[in-house]
């Protein structure tokens, strides 16, 4: 359950103001009235992308020395904390086109936009941290949906009420605390090793 909760919380907060959330706003504006096709595309793209990311993380977590892995993960999460403070921008290439329809455009654009994104890399790290592959995939996917469904349904009205700078700071703080806890475990042996599935 810890794998699910940590994955859900980290990705849901990190996704606020992220380029894939900006893509959700753009797609909702481009395909007005096609909300459910967009949401379905986001879900399918995220599930596929995060499954591959968590699978890679799981393989890394099982292959690398546990102490070295904790140092890598701890420093990685501190890096995510810094990255979370930087506002994202969406390039024209990631906005997608009209040629495929709302679902296919969303699926392709979202999958590609998520490649190398902080939420995807966080999913790799979470997959390495926790042995519960499916809990990581379900948690990160639901975290993405919690952040992106309101963006699709409420659009610009939402951005007036959500202070992005505060959300970025909160995401950075969560990543930093997680990184510091992992580093403390690597340094002092606090028993925060890779939890078994469960």
Image: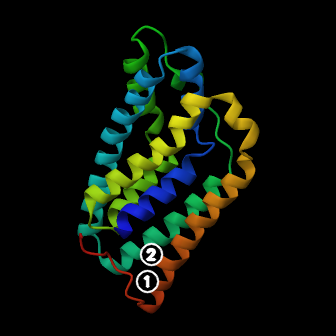
Q: Residue furthest top?
A: 99
* Gap between marks 2 and 1 measured at Cα: 6 Å
Q: Nearer the viewer, residue 39 or 165?
A: 39
Residue ID for mark 1: 186
Q: Is residue 62 above or below residue 49?
A: below
Where does label 2 land, which residue?
A: 71
Residue 30 lies, in percent from the top left, at: 56, 15
Q: Is residue 74 above or below residue 158?
A: below
Location of residue 186 (image quadrant): bottom left
- For disc 2, the neighbor class at 10 Å (few under 14, some 14 to 19, many from 20) is some
Residue in the foreground of this view, choosing between 43 and 193: 43
Q: Which mark is residue 127?
A: none
Left/right of residue 20 with respect to residue 158 in the rendered view: left
**Above or below: residue 86 compared with residue 198:** above
The quadrant of the rendering that contains the C terminus is bottom left
Within 10 angstroms of label 1, few (less than 14), some, or many (20 or more) residues?
many
Which residue corresponds to the image point at 33% horizontal and 64% vertical from the top-left? 128
Q: Is residue 189 above or below residue 74?
A: below
Q: Residue at x 49, y 19 (%)?
A: 96
Residue 191 seen in render: yes
Q: Earlier in the sequence, mark 2 or mark 1?
A: 2
Q: Position of residue 164 (x, y in %)?
A: 71, 46
SS label for mark 2: helix
> Left or right of 159: which side holds 1?
left
**For the point 29% across and 70% down, which residue is it?**
64
The N terminus: image quadrant: bottom left
Residue 132 drawn at (x, y percent): 27, 64
Q: Is the Cβ of the residue at disc 2 closer than 8 Å to that at disc 1?
A: yes
Res. 116 in view: no
Percent of width and height locating residue 78: 57, 66
């Amino acid at each position: 359950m810890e794998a699910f909760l940590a994955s859900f919380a980290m990705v849901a907060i990190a996704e606020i103001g992220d380029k894939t959330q900006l893509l959700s706003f753009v797609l909702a504006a481009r395909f007005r009235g096609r909300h459910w096709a967009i949401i379905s595309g986001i879900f399918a793209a995220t599930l596929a992308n995060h499954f591959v990311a968590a699978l890679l993380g799981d393989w890394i977590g099982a292959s690398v020395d546990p102490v070295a892995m904790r140092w890598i993960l701890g420093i990685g999460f501190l890096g995510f904390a810094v990255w979370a403070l930087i506002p994202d921008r969406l390039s024209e290439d990631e906005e997608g086109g009209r040629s495929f329809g709302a679902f296919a455009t969303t699926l392709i654009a979202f999958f590609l936009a998520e490649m190398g994104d902080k939420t995807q890399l966080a999913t790799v790290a979470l997959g390495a941290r926790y042995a519960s592959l499916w809990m990581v995939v379900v948690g990160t996917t639901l975290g993405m949906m919690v952040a992106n469904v309101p963006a699709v349904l409420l659009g610009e009205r939402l951005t007036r009420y959500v202070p992005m700078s505060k959300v970025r700071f909160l995401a950075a703080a969560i990543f930093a605390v997680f990184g510091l806890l992992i580093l403390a475990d690597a340094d002092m042996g606090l028993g925060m090793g890779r939890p078994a599935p469960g």
